[in-house]
Image (cartoon, rainbow, N blue to C red):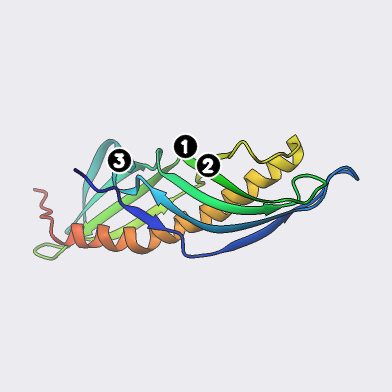
């Protein structure tokens, strides 16, 4: 049985979705907990990696897909209706259409290291629980705020722990081009 790795989110996020008419209230949102799943299985190489010999050093450049990473959040909301009821709303957000570049370099007889790791424009399909009752404009604002929060969290994971793990893996690999 394989244990699914979950990267817990470190930051609490509070924000507000403003009312759009006199018939609704400002929505207060507090992200109370959450995690990122599929980090260990979703990221994969797209196409072939390109090796090169530059100034005697071996470099390997690859395109990576980050599609399939799933964030699961629990939010506490207040103000999605005129009664101003406090609700717990589960939110899922799936990464889609997101790629990055990875370049690993090694000098002769030296361990490799991550020279470049770059992820541009992470896209999220945000799906709040059915118990959140917002009009289209407020729902879009809710989703945009969640996506912005998750984008920041994902970047912290990619450029933090994930890059450290990539460096450890690269240091154990043998790079030799003739």
Residue corresponding to mark 1: 96
The spot of residue 72 in percent (x, y) is 47, 47
User: How many residues crowd around disc 3 within 10 Å: few (fewer than 14), some, or many (20 or more)?
Assistant: some
Secondary element at tag 3: strand
Q: Who comes first in sequence, dot 2 or dot 1?
A: 1
125 or 74, nearer to the observer: 74
Which residue is label 2 attached to? 124
Q: Disc 3 marks which residue? A: 44
From the top left corner, tell me how far across and down residue 5 is, in percent.
Answer: 30, 52
Disc 1 crowd rating (10 Å Cα; few below 14, some 14-19, many 20+) is some
Q: Is residue 133 left or right of residue 165?
A: right
- Counting residues from the start of the chain, the first of labels 3 and 2 encountered is 3
Residue at 38% across, 47% down? 37
Label count reads 3
User: Looking at this view, is 129 or 50 the one in front?
Assistant: 129
Q: Earlier in the sequence, mark 3 or mark 1?
A: 3
CA gap between label 3 and label 2 equals 18 Å
Q: Nearer the viewer, residue 96 or 105?
A: 96
- The image shows residue 57 at horizontal and vertical percentages of 18, 59
Q: CA distance from mark 2 to mark 1?
A: 6 Å
Q: Is residue 178 above or below residue 45?
A: below
């Amino acid at each position: 049985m394989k244990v699914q790795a979950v990267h817990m989110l470190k930051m609490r996020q509070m924000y507000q979705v403003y009312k759009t008419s006199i018939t609704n209230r400002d929505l207060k949102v507090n992200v109370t907990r959450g995690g990122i799943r599929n980090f260990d299985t979703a990221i994969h190489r797209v196409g072939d990696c390109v090796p090169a010999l530059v100034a005697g050093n071996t470099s390997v450049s690859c395109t990576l897909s980050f599609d399939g990473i799933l964030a699961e959040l629990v939010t506490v909301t207040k103000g999605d209706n005129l009664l101003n009821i406090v609700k717990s709303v589960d939110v899922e957000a799936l990464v889609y259409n997101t790629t990055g570049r990875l370049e690993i370099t090694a000098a002769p007889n030296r361990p490799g290291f991550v020279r470049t790791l770059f992820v541009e424009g992470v896209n999220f399909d945000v799906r709040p629980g059915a118990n959140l009752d917002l009009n289209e404009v407020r729902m879009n604002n809710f989703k945009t705020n969640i996506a912005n929060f998750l984008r920041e969290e994902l970047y912290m994971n990619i450029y933090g722990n994930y890059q450290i793990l990539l460096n450890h893996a690269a240091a154990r690999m043998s790079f030799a081009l003739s």
